[in-house]
Image (cartoon, grey):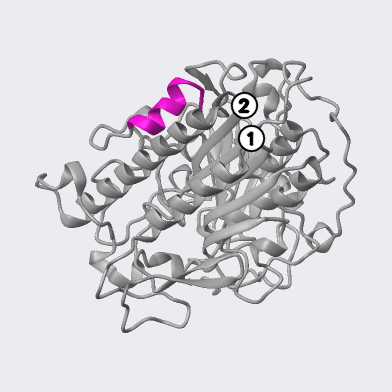
């Protein structure tokens, strides 16, 4: 069973299938930027009208924009587990936000890249292991970690500490009612965690720019501080949105996105100053769909764009996310892709970029071929799969143009949509297309492997 297997890694110089455009090139630096709770409609390049994101939009202008890319899950921890291990939520170890530690036998992207000579740094939110456990990033292949281990701790933008490698890094904030995990609401707000994390990330890039590096910048913006409730969109200043007549939560959200955008610009400037911009591939995405927390309403900015649903739902608004990839001279500027992929694809893609073999039996596919301008030759998924254990549980599968949602898990209550023609998932085809129902249920049965840590909730019998 793949759930607890030990991978055998075979490393080679150039794996079969590597695009001929990449052969002979230096190993590219790899940067993966992941926003937190940023919706499909929250970027200008995806149609946002009220919040401007010029630096992030430039990634699209100079690279490739994906229209049908999906997160690993509809909440934090499992989405990150899918990203790091290349396994979907029917197979991966961490399938929800429960505090479970990633075990040593699970191979992460950082571990896969290490034999290729990469220095790997993680800056931001980890969510896959607690203090003093085997799940720490530095015990999962990363050479440096700075940020939050615990997703609840990461709610707090003014914590009294962050984690540097395996030690607590004190900050000057005061939080008199701080929880054991570091969450809460500060009364003296001195050091904004996002800013401190960005500075550490830029230092890592400068320190390691002469060797191949992998940076996983897992920022916490624009997640809300749930413990601060209606005042949860914590940000040092409201920037260009201070004088709007918007509600405080909406102003805070916009200011957070603007701050993230400005720091993407700082990173781009740093790469150019160091002379490594041309040989650096940058991915930009979000861990799941937009939230309705911290005093904001995702409908105000139309954060899910044309999609239905938000975070914690398996309609596309909860899992279809922005994906921008920029790599000068390798990826055609201003291009758009219809490749249907998800976070599980990142590990095999990074492996191919680095010239090493990925672990066997992954759920992900390398999409280097799509990136380098050969979409007709790009391998395609038979299906994409998700399962979610909160709110009574639900499952979803995307196959071809169709998407099925089963709620609760294991039931016969199924909805089916053609998400290419019906992007808003308004026309349920389940009654008219029993053939699609049969196919979807077969895929779902194939994809779900039971785990002792993740039990399908018992459903009450209906009259």
Q: Residue at x 25, y 32 (%)?
A: 49
Q: Residue at x 40, y 66 (%)?
A: 155
Where is residue 346, by image quadrant?
Answer: top right
Name the side, left or right, on which 45 lies relative to 125. Answer: left
Is 257 located above or below residue 401 in the figure?
A: below
Residue 29's tag is: 1
Q: Callout 1: 10 Å neighbours few (<14), some, many (20+)?
A: many
Query: Was residue 58 drawn as part of the magenta stretch in this picture?
Result: yes
Question: Is residue 59 in sight in this rendering?
Answer: yes
* Position in image of residue 116 (x %, y %): 79, 40
What segment carries the magenta color? 54-66
Q: Callout 2: 10 Å neighbours few (<14), some, many (20+)?
A: some
Q: Residue at x 60, y 73 (%)?
A: 130
Which residue is identified by label 2? Answer: 279
Question: Is residue 87 in sight in this rendering?
Answer: no
User: Who is closer to the viewer here, 350 or 437?
Assistant: 350
Query: Was residue 338 drawn as part of the magenta stretch in this picture?
Result: no
Q: Quadrant of the N terminus?
A: bottom right
Q: CA distance from mark 2 to mark 1?
A: 6 Å
Is 99 located above or below residue 96 in the figure?
A: below
Name the side, left or right, on which 53 lies relative to 91. Answer: left
Where disc 2 sits, the SS reads helix
Residue 271's tag is: none
Where disc 1 sits, the SS reads strand
């Amino acid at each position: 069973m793949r759930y607890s297997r030990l991978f055998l890694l075979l490393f080679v110089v150039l794996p079969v299938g590597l695009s001929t455009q990449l052969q002979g090139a230096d190993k590219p630096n790899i940067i993966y930027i992941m926003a937190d709770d940023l919706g499909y409609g929250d970027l200008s390049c995806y149609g946002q009208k009220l919040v401007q994101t010029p630096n992030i939009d430039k990634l699209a202008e100079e690279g490739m924009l994906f229209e049908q890319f999906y997160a690993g899950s509809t909440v934090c921890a499992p989405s990150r587990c899918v990203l790091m291990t290349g396994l979907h939520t029917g197979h991966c170890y961490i399938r929800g936000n429960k505090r479970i530690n990633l075990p040593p036998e699970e191979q992460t992207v950082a571990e896969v890249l290490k034999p290729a000579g990469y220095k790997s740094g993680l800056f931001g939110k980890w969510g896959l292991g607690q203090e003093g456990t085997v799940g720490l990033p530095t015990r999962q292949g990363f050479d440096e970690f700075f940020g939050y281990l615990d997703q609840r701790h990461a709610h707090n933008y003014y914590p009294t500490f962050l984690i540097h490698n395996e030690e607590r890094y004190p900050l000057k904030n005061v939080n008199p009612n701080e929880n054991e995990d570091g969450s809460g609401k500060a009364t003296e707000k001195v050091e904004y965690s996002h800013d401190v994390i960005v500075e550490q990330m830029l230092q890592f890039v400068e320190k390691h720019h002469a060797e191949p590096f992998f940076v996983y910048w897992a920022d916490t913006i624009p997640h809300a501080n749930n413990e601060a409730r209606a005042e949860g969109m914590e940000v040092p200043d409201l920037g260009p949105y201070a004088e709007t007549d918007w509600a405080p939560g909406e102003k805070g959200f916009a200011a957070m996105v603007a701050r993230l955008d400005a720091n993407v610009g700082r990173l781009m400037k740093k790469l150019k100053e160091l002379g490594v911009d041309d040989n650096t591939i940058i991915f930009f995405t979000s861990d799941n769909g937009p939230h309705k927390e911290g005093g904001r309403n995702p409908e105000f900015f139309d954060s899910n764009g044309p999609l239905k649903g938000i975070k914690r739902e398996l309609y596309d608004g909860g899992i279809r996310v922005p994906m921008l990839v920029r790599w000068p001279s390798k990826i055609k500027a201003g291009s758009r892709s219809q490749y249907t992929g998800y976070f599980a694809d990142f590990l095999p893609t990074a492996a191919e970029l680095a010239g090493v073999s990925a672990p066997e039996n992954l759920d992900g596919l390398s999409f280097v071929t799509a990136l380098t301008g050969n979409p007709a030759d790009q391998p395609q998924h038979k299906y994409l799969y998700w399962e979610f254990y909160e709110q009574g549980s639900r499952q979803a599968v995307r196959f071809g143009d169709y998407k099925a949602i089963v709620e609760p898990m294991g039931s016969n209550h199924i909805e089916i949509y053609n998400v290419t023609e019906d992007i808003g998932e308004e026309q349920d085809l389940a009654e008219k297309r029993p053939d699609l129902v049969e196919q979807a249920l077969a895929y779902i049965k194939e994809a779900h492997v039971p785990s002792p840590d993740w039990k399908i909730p018992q459903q009450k019998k209906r009259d």
